[in-house]
Amino acid sequence: MLKQHDSIVHQLNDKMKSVLKKLFVFVFVLLIIGFFFCVYVMQAPPVAEPEQPKLLVHVQTSVRKRPTVNSVPVATTKNEHLFSLDRTYLSNLNSSILSGELLFNVVLGVRAKYNAPLLDKEVSTGFDWQKMFAESAVGTRLNSKTPKIKVTLSGQDWLLTDSTGAGYLIQKTGDQLEIFLPDLLEAFELNNMILSNDYEFTVVKPGKQWLITNNVHQQRYEIRSDAKKINVYQHPKYPIQTLLFEVDSDPQIPLPEEKLPDEIYNGFKSLDIQLSPKAKVMQEEDGVSWKITQGTQKYTIHHEGSRLKVYLDLDSGWLLLKLSDRINAWVQSERGTILMPPEPTLTSRQQLKKDMLAFFAKLKNSVGISDQNDL
């Protein structure tokens, strides 16, 4: 009986050892996998730097050298010419309808049996198109008693244009004619300029000047008509320079509120900004930032390591724009629209890395570990 008992105990010990051994191997493998997973996550590609805010500058806005009353213009913003169209699309612009919308139908009756050349002639001379537009095309006016008819496909498709050049597409469908507006949206697409469905159309000068605002991309297009063609322009969007300059600084020496260091004044002076010694300087709650206010201009000084970085606030009266590699200039913020770019989109790996770093930082704070050596 005793031997049987010892045998049972021995078997149980062997099983326990086997279970512990398997458990140890499982935990070891799990730790190895976790280690390599952490290494994989921590080697995630860096997150792209956020884009600079941009200013949609309005037409003929003077860009000035510095934000003072007596500043001198150094450049004038110009719209970028994108492409030109023939005056056919005046019909879209005059009717405030950009798509190729069906205006009305004309029943052909016995004319439906005409052969192609006879039907071409009948479309050109057999209809009072001005009267038919007045009666059927609500809000669209044909500015010619004898419009021109161009055959695009004999017996099937025609282009009608009035004295201004505005055009309308005529298409034979069965026993009737369908009269359409041209498709200005399609013309934009053919020139690699796709408008979203969310846009605003504004008539600035009837028959001469129009504005289209793409609300999705916050982009504005100006359309102007001359005697020969229609020109499409894009209003400029310039990046706003928020970081003005930076200087060396000892992180252990606080920035005095009553008087800024000479390096800060010299940095402003290098940008032709006359910062008054009486400008208000207030420390922010974080203890490492300071706000400077001088009239409508607002600046922020931030301590980053051994550097003092000076930023321009976006709610200032004047904003600094980068017009080219050689020209930086100032423009009044009220003359344009500030476009804030979206935050960079993180991949799942980058998000895991961000969460892990935040967890480690929280863990260090909870156990009282500091990044700085005790003095």
Image (spheres, rainbow, N blue to C red):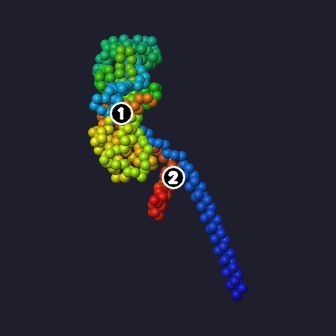
In the displayed structure, would residue 363 be above or below residue 20? above
Residue closer to the observer: 167 or 343: 343
**Residue positioned most to the right:** 3
Q: Residues within 10 Å of mark 1 (few under 14, many from 20)?
A: some
Figure quadrant of residue 207: top left
Secondary structure state at the residue bearing disc 2: helix
Q: Position of residue 369 (x, y in %)?
A: 48, 61
* 227 relative position to 17: left or right: left
The numbered dot on residue 291 is none
Q: Position of residue 318 (x, y in %)?
A: 32, 35
Q: Residues within 10 Å of mark 2 (few under 14, many from 20)?
A: many
Residue closer to the observer: 169 or 182: 182
Disc nearer the start of the sequence (2/1): 1
- Identified at 38% across, 34% down, the residue is 271
Residue closer to the observer: 267 or 343: 267
* 356 relative position to 262: left or right: right
Which quadrant holds the N terminus?
bottom right
- Identified at 44% across, 42% down, the residue is 50
The numbered dot on residue 272 is 1
Q: Amino acid at mark 2?
A: Lys
* 344 relative position to 214: left or right: right
Mark 2 vs mark 1, CA separation in Å: 42 Å
Q: Mark yes or no: residue 320 visible.
A: no
Which quadrant holds the C terminus?
bottom left
- Identified at 39% across, 46% down, the residue is 302
Q: Amino acid at mark 1?
A: Asp
Q: Give the residue pinned by disc 2.
A: 353
